[in-house]
Amino acid sequence: MSEAATGLVRISLDAMGGDFGPSVVIPGAARAAERHPDARFVIFGKEAEINAELAKFPALRDKVKVTHAEIAISMEDKPSQALRAGRYKSSMWMAIDAVKKGDADVCVSAGNTGALMVMSRFCLKMMPGIDRPAIACMWPTAKGESIVLDVGASIGAEAENLVDMAIMGSAMARIVFDIDRPTVGLLNVGVEEMKGVEEVKEAARILRESNLPNMQYMGYVEGDDIGKGTTDVVVTEGFSGNIALKTAEGTAKQVADFLKAAISRSFMAKIGYVFARGAFKALKAKLDPRRSNGGVFLGLDGIVVKSHGGTDPLGFATAIDVAYDMVKYELLAKITKALAERGDWVLPGASSSMVEAAGDAGAAQPAKAPTNGTEG
């Protein structure tokens, strides 16, 4: 009996990705394996380095298959260079290709974001009815967490792209938050209907009038609504989304530095810290980027998860957790079904054949999420 038939979740790992390679990837996989006994790993990279790390985690060894890859994509490589040099033979490409071939259900890499996106799109192709991918990330909020997309897959977006992102983001939210109709907002410069660029206004009209069954469109949200957790899903294009993400990360670090400086400024401040230590620990945990690590590439005909390149084993294990959930709770099946439920209206710029293709894919979708991409 194959592993797929037994219900195991097969995760391919780019062991050479990120700032630290196998020294983070393997310990991260060991942590994740403890939480997910039904996970199995296919790991690609320099075999000697991988095996040296695996020797430290004997409990993981029986859950791993290692395949040697001589080429490692660096964090400095341009996407086009990475594709030319690493196609077919780099650890990154081989980890993605394992999903396409059906040898893995999901790929996780901490490598170069641009290279990973280009290789993923080239290898896996796009889902029927989706023009471009989006990166969705988990965002800590006052209410818990939200999903924000796109945070950097592509610059600019037409109205149909924003609607696609709302559909895909809500499908992911149904998995992550275990709710039937996640709330969705479009990031804008104000909440008034007349504000914003034409693409955002048109996307708002479509979402408002379509009344899709698997989401609640709540209208426009502003930048401060992201941290408030006003909606479960926040949709924007990649330029503003990436700026928002980097601003939030920088602000969190700045606040931490301010607090550290204030605490060490005087003896009384240090005494105050002793009494407030529990509150400071809770704040540190809330702002810890390792606990929100793992951006999902949505729109691909296969699942790829991007880990932060500078994370540690705890953060990489969190990215694996995200990948595991996307497979276990059938992300691709949910997105395909949601695309088919857009109804008989056609997005501006989208052909009716694209909508029909999404409907056909939904009808043909098996109970378990598909484990490989297609050539088309």
Image (tube, helix red, strand yellow):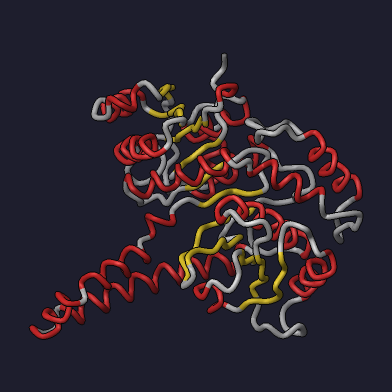
Image quadrant in which you'd find residue 202: bottom right
For the C terminus, the image quarter is top right
Instruction: Note whether 31 is above or below 180 in the view shown.
Output: above
- Say which of 211 and 191 sits in front: 211
Residue 47 placement, left or right of 207? left
Write the residue at 64% across / 42% down: 121
**Residue 371, percent across and down?**
63, 31
Q: Position of residue 64 (x, y in %)?
A: 40, 24
Specify the quadrant of the image occupied by residue 191: bottom right
How many badges with numbers are in the image?
0
Q: Residue at x 65, y 30 (%)?
A: 372
Vertical arrangement, residue 372 with respect to residue 348, above or below: above
Which of 143 and 123 lies nearest the eye of the viewer? 143
* Residue 49, percent from left and from top: 30, 28
**Picture layout, residue 247 above or below residue 11:** below
Residue at the farthest top position: 1
- In the visual, does 357 lie left or right of 188? right
